[in-house]
Amino acid sequence: MDENDELNVPAGGDDEAENQNQSSDDSNDNSPEEEQEHNQDVGSNDALTRVTGMYKDWFLDYASYVILERAVPAIEDGFKPVQRRIMHSLKDLDDGRYNKVANVVGHTMQYHPHGDASIADAMVQIGQKDLLIDTQGNWGNILTGDGAAAPRYIEARLSKFALEVVFSPKITEWQLSYDGRKKEPVNLPVKFPLLLAQGAEGIAVGLSTKIMPHNFNELIDASIKHLQGKRFKLFPDFPTAGVIDVSNYNDGMRGGKVRVRAKIAQHTKSTLVISEIPYGTNTTTLKESILKANDKGKIKIKKIDDNTAAEVELMIHLPNNISPDKTIDALYAFTACETSISPLSCIIEDNKPLFIGVSEMLRRSTDATVDLLKQELEIQLSELEEQWHFASLERIFIENRIYRDIEEEETWEGVIAAIDKGLKPFTKNLRRAVTEEDIVRLTEIRIKRISKFDLDKAQQNLDNLEKKIAEVKHHLAHLVEYAIDYFQNLKDTYGEGRERKSEIRIFEDIEATKVVIRNTKLYVNREEGFVGTSLKRDEYVTDCSDIDDIIAFTKTGKMMVFKVDSKIFVGKGIIYVAVFKKKDKRTVYNIIYRNGKGGATYIKRFNVVSITREKLYNVGKGKPGTQVYYFSGNPNGEAEIVTVHLRRSGKIKKLKWDIDFADISIKGRGARGNLVTKNPVKRIELKEKGLSTLKPRKLWFDETVHRLNNDERGEFMGEFRSGDRLLIVNQDGLVKTVIPEITLHFDENIIILEKWIPEKPLSAIYWDGEKELFYVKRFLIENPDKEENILTDHPKSYLERFFTDYRPRAEIVFAKKRGQERKENWVLDLEEFIAVKGITARGNQLTKDKVLEISGLSPLPYEPPEHSNTEDVEGGDDDNNEKDAGNEPLGDEESSSGNGSKKSDNPSSKTDSSENATPRKPSPKENKDNGDDQPTLFD
């Protein structure tokens, strides 16, 4: 605070301060008469106070007030002061009927020293959480973001849960309200972890809190586990549902993070539906973020319809030829369909802010609940003992007719003494001594009650009281068990309908560059060496997005990767430009180049995985005069055949021969490559395009995230070549095949997911709702690009069993007919039972008898036809290996090969022996040049 003092030095600086000191010294020299006169003048005016001191005190007071009295909830009851005062007012007004919210707000203002708007807003927030307040009228909608009606139009009352859990006046500590006219609770005796159930959010001065809401039943289960000495974990549960990733929740403390996603599903081929939204958003803000992303070109949609009422329903309509799976990922990447929430658990305890995790909050809340239950039991025991004590005195007083002893007494003291004397012979079995107050209460018994006193009923009442006393004492002796029963009773009474809404799942990371819509065009000026989106008069390269990376190669053997920009200089003589994919080991670059001026010519294949943006790399050794004769980029590792032409000079006999890039191993970018020739090269021509030399892609399905991956997580799906597809069958009878991509989304009701073998028949047993019988069908998928339903259109039809084996078998268990023995089980060979028919055929009737159960058996043995082996070349790692890949000449005049090309030994080549993966030669459509590879010829 001394720094603040320095800040308040007058503008005159040291000179003025010096003058002030001098004047003060002069004042000390004044005579006593002058001092007295001066003091009288000062006393007649207001006292002077330095601004510095006012600021120091006022700011700290204000900060403390905001932290303690407005923004941060207390751990004792989980309420902020305004919420606590609202609940207290509702209890004051409670008569079982609804009250106008405006009346409740006005009543709360007796305790809360702020305006009615803040009270009404806080009350609406409590009501929307549907736990403490029973609402009536339009209280708004957290799904759509619609606000509540005016307080005069809506009504509220305390819920049954609030009446049972929140209030207990006998153990409540009270304090005067801000104006001293009323009493309000310091903290409400809440016997439940209410703070964790409702959550809290607030911003104070230099402090904030953000506590996530948790599931009602899970909190009770965790409290019970804590009382039992067991471990527990707590994760958020949001009222807007959605899918959450809590792997970094960090117990709700600083540094944690919760990723929340909307639940998006494919409704039709061109329609997506959002049925759940992230916490903290609503359909209005979500719709705006989607439209904003569409305007920026990140995604592409036709329109979006908001049909939300009681449940969320946002219909997103897609244009033709737009992938629904990629659009779902793009929605997560570029819109509010995925949000990240950073919790910060801060609470008030003993008038001090405290940072603790949600687990510790629950432990403290549970322990506090046990203490409150103990206090209630002790008060209950005291009251029961008092009732027993007075009931016993009353019985003694009436049964022994002690009231007659006071007939002759003339004074009040005499009456008290006479009764006390009459009770003494019978007080041995009482639980405490008789006091004057007890005697006064006896004198207040009416004659009518004395005349109708029933001894048996009195004894019965005493017996009941003794049972209750024993029960309460038992609860006090077994307090933990009593608290567990209390929590279990809360769950049984109020837990129905409060099941978890948010689905917990681990999210996969979405690469924005893979799902963004390519909304701009890329151009290149090869001669000048410029690449960009603004060079519209130059050569068009490809479509791209504004977040893509671009890779470019020059004729001098230089390479650069850079962000998309309007115009960027790479280097003169650009020979190849394309969109760059990070960590892409399948794109292989084929190159033949001269190593320096007058140097030898080399050939190599390499891939580029990791780089530094806007840095020039050498494809060869970087010698001056390096020249690229041939270059191509191949997204699937294709290897073409080229023809080498030498210049005629000297004794060269062979001036032309072919080289197959498939003979060259894939190495690192920095490798020199294989020697082609030491003689001058005239030109190199493309002779024949090749097929992919890479191994098939191995894919796995991760059940946790419902996504495909190549990281060996989950169930192995198989090895996939170009053209291979996945077979997908769901419980609704929908059958389809898809090209396996990492971005695919899968429904929850999938029953079959495996590599599709076109020639393998598929078999199904299904219930025909129209015929009310089981049918069997076997079929082949005739149109791989079409999704078809193998069931009939009747709403009661359902899929019983589905088989993907060549020779499947099933066991049919029949129901027992009345008065007859059960029919023996039938082992059904589906291959013999029915021939392969069309996918739309009904099939053959299984049986007319009533079937109890159908189970699958192990299939009959089958030997698939043998296929020719295929040689593959495995892609190498992208390391800047400076070692040469070999200097063996390939086919020049020194080569002894008769056909002009020589096969190099490739240790990474392997033979595919998979039984399921049948090698297929790609169709002409698959081999069509899509412009990604750009072979360049140079004379």
Image (cartoon, rainbow, N blue to C red):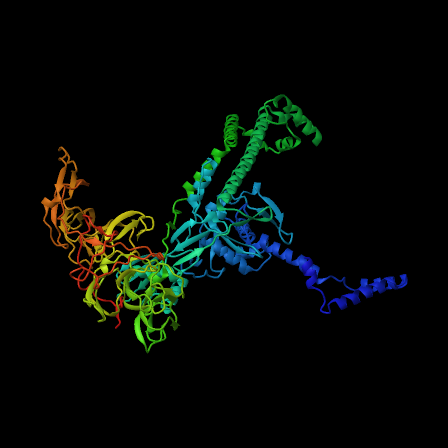
The answer to which image quadrant residue 680 occupies is bottom left
In the image: residue 98, left or right of residue 921? right
Residue that lies at the very extreme toward the top in this rendered image: 425
Q: Where is residue 687 in the image (x, y as percent from the top left)?
A: 19, 67
Q: Which of 138 and 449 is in front in this view?
A: 138
The quarter holding residue 846 reads top left
For this view, does 286 lie left or right of residue 872? right
Q: Nearest the camera: 100 or 404?
A: 100
- Of 798 and 485, which appears nearest the observer? 798
Q: Residue at x 45, y 39 (%)?
A: 231
Q: Which of 108 and 258 is in front in this view?
A: 258
Please name the residue shown 25% across and 51% down the image: 907
Identify whether 12 is placed above or below 461.
below
Instruction: State the quadrant of the C terminus.
Output: bottom left
Instruction: Tell me: residue 858, above or below residue 640.
Output: above
Residue reaching furthest front? 651
**Horizontal placement of 801 versus 433: left or right?**
left
Q: Position of residue 176 (x, y in %)?
A: 63, 49
Give the image location of residue 173, x and y in percent: 60, 44
Q: Residue furthest bottom?
A: 537
Query: Is residue 307 in view from this perspective?
Result: no
Displayed quadrant of residue 299: bottom left
User: Percent position (x, y) of residue 367?
Assistant: 52, 39
Quick check: can you spot residue 807? yes
Say how many tags the image has.
0
